[in-house]
Image (spheres, helix red, strand yellow):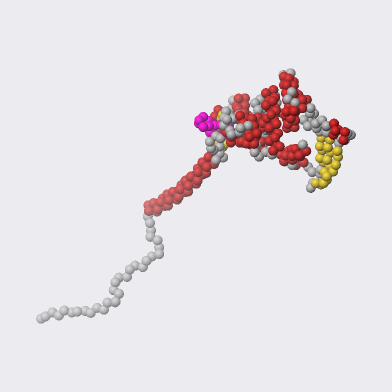
């Protein structure tokens, strides 16, 4: 008996591959260790970014600081012994400064509002003073009087560049002239030293005045030259040359040029005043210059032929029209009075001085 193999026909669907599990939108779960590692990596990255930003900002500030320091705009605090005053002859006439004590008190109570200015010395031994001689003296005085270490160092701006003697003289003079801090005698003294210094190109006093006072009007430069002549003649006999007013100094210089013999008379009169004050000294100069107690110039003796035509005329009064309105003018011996409806005290002093000097020069 034979066996028969049965064959079963099974109908399968066309896509018989098992279906893949449907993707799930839910995030895969991460263990606590993996989460901690990821969070730490993010924190490290944030700190690195912040550190780079801070480093870039610090680099920018450092470059800016270096640029400002090289330009002389950064205040340094220097020991007093490192600041020298030997390269220039100062524009201050040697002698007692009656206002130095007031400056020292002001600095002690209120502080130093304007640092001194210095240049590095070529030999590397400290710094050379350019501007601020009286401020430096005030600090030295405070340190000597108190012994307080706070006054042993002074704020200073270190200027860039190599020392230029002519430029240093100009810086020194310009600061004091702009601040109206120099008398005509001191300006003349500075011009004399500038002319005498072999490191400058000035061949004589005229060139020195022109170089130092380039921005000053011609009349002012002329006054300075007159004071320089006066110092040449009697400067060694004067104790208070800075007290001499512009009018007295210019007039006295003119009188000496016309009457050189009065130099001996001035020296003799001053020699008899051992304990003289500034006013005592001025009285001697006024007497020789034939001026009154206000240092105002009086007109020269009228020529005989002019005297007859002007006899009896001791004063002239007239009115003129101006942009400020009507002006009343009264002219007399040694006097010129101008009255107008304007507050002259509101005008800048330097401008007023220039206008008056120009007026007087125009009448000469």
| Closer to us: 63 or 335 | 335
Quadrant for the N terminus, please. Answer: bottom left
Q: Residue at x 72, y 41 (%)?
A: 351
Whether residue 124 is in magenta: the answer is: yes
Q: Is residue 185 left or right of residue 160?
A: right
| Residue, far left | 1
In the rendered structure, which segment of residues is drawn in magenta? 116-130
Of helix, strand and loop, which mostly describes the magenta segment? strand
Q: Is residue 267 above or below residue 47?
A: above
Quadrant for the C terminus, please. Answer: top right
Residue 170 is situated, as x and y percent measured from the top left of the image, at: 61, 36
Residue 81 is situated, as x and y percent measured from the top left of the image, at: 55, 28
Q: Residue at x 62, y 36 (%)?
A: 211
Q: Residue 102: in sight, yes or no? A: no
Whether residue 53 is in magenta: the answer is: no
The image quadrant of residue 334 is top right
| Closer to us: 26 or 260 | 260
Q: Is residue 114 left or right of residue 162?
A: right
Q: Residue at x 84, y 43 (%)?
A: 319
Q: Residue at x 48, y 45 (%)?
A: 59
Q: Residue 86: in sight, yes or no? A: yes
């Amino acid at each position: 008996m034979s066996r028969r193999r049965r064959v079963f026909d099974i109908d399968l669907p066309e896509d018989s591959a098992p279906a893949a599990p449907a993707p799930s939108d839910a995030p895969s779960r991460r263990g606590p260790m993996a989460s901690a590692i990821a969070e730490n990596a993010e924190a490290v990255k944030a700190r690195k970014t912040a550190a780079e930003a801070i480093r870039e900002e610090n680099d920018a500030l450092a470059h800016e600081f270096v640029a400002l320091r090289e330009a002389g705009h950064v205040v340094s605090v220097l020991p007093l012994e490192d600041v020298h005053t030997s390269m220039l002859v100062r524009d201050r006439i040697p002698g007692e400064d009656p206002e130095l004590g007031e400056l020292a008190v002001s600095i002690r109570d209120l502080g130093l509002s304007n640092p001194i200015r210095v240049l590095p010395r070529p030999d590397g031994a400290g710094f050379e003073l350019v501007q601020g001689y009286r401020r430096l003296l005030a600090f030295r005085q405070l340190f000597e009087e108190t012994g307080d270490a706070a006054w042993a160092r002074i704020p200073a701006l270190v200027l860039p560049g190599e020392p230029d003697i002519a430029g240093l003289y100009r810086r020194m003079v310009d600061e004091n002239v702009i601040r109206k801090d120099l008398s005509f005698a001191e300006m003349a003294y500075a011009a004399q030293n500038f002319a005498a210094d072999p490191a400058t190109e000035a061949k004589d006093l005229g060139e020195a005045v022109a170089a130092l006072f380039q921005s000053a009007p011609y009349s002012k430069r002329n006054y300075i030259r007159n004071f320089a002549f006066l110092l040449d003649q009697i400067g060694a006999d004067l104790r208070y040359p800075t007290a001499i007013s512009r009018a007295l100094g210019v007039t006295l210089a003119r009188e000496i040029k016309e009457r050189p013999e009065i130099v001996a008379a001035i020296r003799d009169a001053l020699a008899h005043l051992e304990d003289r004050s500034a006013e005592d000294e001025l009285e001697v100069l006024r007497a020789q210059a034939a001026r009154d107690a206000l240092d105002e110039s009086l007109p020269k003796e009228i020529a005989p032929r002019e005297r007859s035509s002007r006899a009896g005329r001791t004063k002239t009064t007239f009115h003129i029209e101006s942009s400020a309105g009507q002006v009343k003018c009264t002219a007399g011996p040694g006097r010129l009075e101008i009255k107008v409806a304007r507050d002259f005290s509101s005008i800048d002093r330097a401008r007023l001085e220039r206008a008056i000097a120009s007026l007087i020069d125009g009448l000469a």
